[in-house]
Structure formats: structure tokens, C-alpha cells
Amino acid sequence: MSDPIFFASSTALSLGDIAGAAGISLPEGADPGAMVGGASPLETAGPGDLAYMDNARYGDVLAQTKALACLVSPRFAAKVPPTTVALVTRDPYRVYAGLLARFHPEAMRPHSQFATEGVSPGAHVHPKARLEDGVIVDPGAVIGPGAEIGSGTVIGPNAVIGPNVRIGRDCSIGAGVTLAYALVGNRVILHPGARIGQDGFGFAMGPGGHLKVPQTGRVIVQDDVEIGANTTIDRGAGRDTVIGEGTKIDNLVQIAHNVVIGRHCVIVSGVGISGSTTLEDYVVLGGQVGVVGHLRIGMGSQIAGSSNVNRDVPPGSRWGGTPAKPVRTWFRELTALARLAEKSGRDTSEPPKD
């Protein structure tokens, strides 16, 4: 059986090019014309590869790497072997990410899996839909009446774009995505299976049964947002559900109706955000965080994974636990509980006294 390489390096860069792109200086004696053919992990990098390291756990691996060059922070520079060029930078991972994008530009966003240009014969585009030049539509995709899609956007196989949906330019709509009652900006990535714009969970409860509340809002997804596979974002009940510019949302996240998420937030997998909650700009929610409804999480706040937020969080806070609280308080509680459990264990193990 053949062993395909899905993301072969598409270009080579000289050490001089890499140093220039990273804004760093080559060490004395390094050949700026030496060619780097790609990027690899420390342990598998060969004499033509670039690697990076910024974690003390990998100090021994760094000392044995065969990479041509390695991006390292200043504290690890002395561990780079003499056969490897040390490229010292304060943020090696971020620099590495930028260079990796140059080696593998096709991995930056999902591309068409079938069509090379235009609309596949196996797709269905309603005559009243409007597609700018350069839109690619893969087989099985359905685009409804009144939908508008900007140039450079790729609609993946079996994606469904509902009536009157607006999608900007240079977007990637993954396989099996459903998109309804939504306005999507430019350079947005929706990974396979994302569900955007379905009903929010709204019912008027009563002893005679639960009366469904019509959900008449929209989902607004601003520029440069990325939404992970099988994530669901409900449309607003009255006002819109909003995902702010540059926000990155992982797989398997649930965002309820009327939620407003600010710019450049990070939401990790398994998070659930209840209705009408607001996240201000640059908020980070760790994996499996739960947020109850009608709260506000202040700008720049960070919530530790598996926490449960049941009250407003001030700007710039770091909270964790269930219910969530400032991390110092949370850590003190955990320490006190551990000491109490230890003491209780000692007490019950002592033999009875005569």
C-alpha cells in the first residue's frame, strides 16, 4: 500500500530568508544560503529541516536533534547541538507557525476536495442565488434561493447553504456544514459538520406543556472567525447571535441563542454557553467550561477547563472551579480540602485506644 504525504512542502527557504522573515539574526558562522526544505518535529527533523523548541520537557530531545536549524527561546539556546543552527527568538512557536504557513500554504484552510474551479455538476445552485466569480462548489452541495457568496469561497461537498444567507470572500465552508439565517464575513472557516443558524432552545414552560418560542434572529459571523467541526451556533431568539472578528472556536462547542462573543476570543472544545450571555473581547474558555445564561465575562478574562461559571466575571480575571471563582481562592480551597482529606485518612487509620 502506498503511503501518501498529504502536505508536502511546496517551497524551500534559505536560512537568510527565515531569519529575515522572523526578524532575528543568524549566529556567527551560519551560512545564510543554506536551504531549508521543510519543517519537522525535533525528534524526526533531518539535515534539511527546521524545528522549534520552547518546553523544558524536550531538552534532551533538543540536544539530540538532527535539524539544520531550530527556533529556540534564549533560555534553551545553549542546548542546541553544534550541528544545528540556533535561531534565537522570544516566541519560537509563533515564529514557527508563520514559517510553517510558508512551507504549507495549502494547509491554512480547507480547499476543494473535488472541483478545481466553478460549480460541480453534482451540486445544486438555485437560479436566484448569486455567486461571484471564483467561487468553488463541490458535489452534493445545495445553495438556496437568494444566497450570496463572495469570490474565492469554497463550498464543500454536501454543505447546505440556506435561502438568503450571505457569505463573504475567501471563506471555506467544510463538508456537511449547514448554514441558515446567517451573515458570514470574509476569510471565515467553518469545519465539517458545523451547524450554524438552527433554532435556539426556547420554550415557554407550563403545566399544560411547553410552548415553542419562535426564534426570529440571525447569526452574525464576523471576519477571520474559525469554527470547529460539529460545533453548533443557534440563531437569536429576537436579537442576533454574534461571533466577533478573529474569534477561534474549537470542535464540539455549543453556543446558544442571543449569545454575543467579542473579538479574538478563544473557545476550546466541549464548551457550552447558555443563552444571552456576553463574552467581551479576548476572553479564553478552557475545554468543557459551562457558562449559564445572561452573564457577562469581562474583557481578557480566562476560565480554566472544566469550570462552571454561574455569575459575572470582571475584566482581566483568571477563574476556575465549580462554581468558578478567582484562581487563588480556588487553589486555596483545593489545598484546604487536600489537607482535610489527608488528616481524615490518618485519623481513621489509627488503632483504637484502650
Image (tube, grey):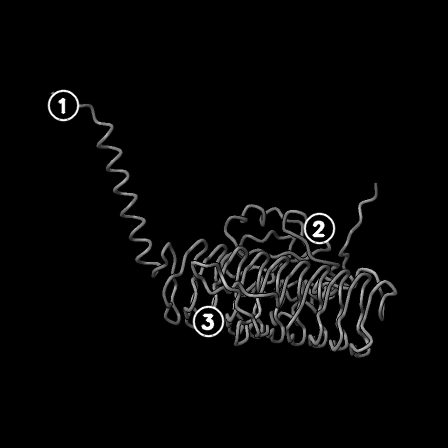
Q: Is residue 285 left or right of residue 155?
A: left
How many labels were placed on the picture?
A: 3
For numbered disc 3, what is the local secondary structure? strand
Could you say which disc has been placed on residue 278 in the image?
3
Who is closer to the viewer here, 11 or 224?
Answer: 224
Amino acid on which disc 3 is placed: Thr
Amino acid on which disc 2 is placed: Gly
Q: Is residue 17 above or below residue 70?
A: below
From the top left corner, tell me how far across and down residue 124 is, in percent.
82, 67
Which residue shows up at 25% across the image and 42% down it? 340
Residue located farthest toward the right when viewing the structure as drawn? 121
Could you say which disc has been placed on residue 46 in the image?
2
Amino acid on which disc 1 is placed: Lys
For numbered disc 1, what is the local secondary structure? loop
Which residue shows up at 77% across the image and 54% down it? 6
Q: Quadrant of the N terminus?
A: top right
Q: Which label's residue is closer to the chain start, 2 or 1?
A: 2
Residue that numbered label 1 is attached to: 353
Q: Which label's residue is closer to the chain start, 2 or 3?
A: 2
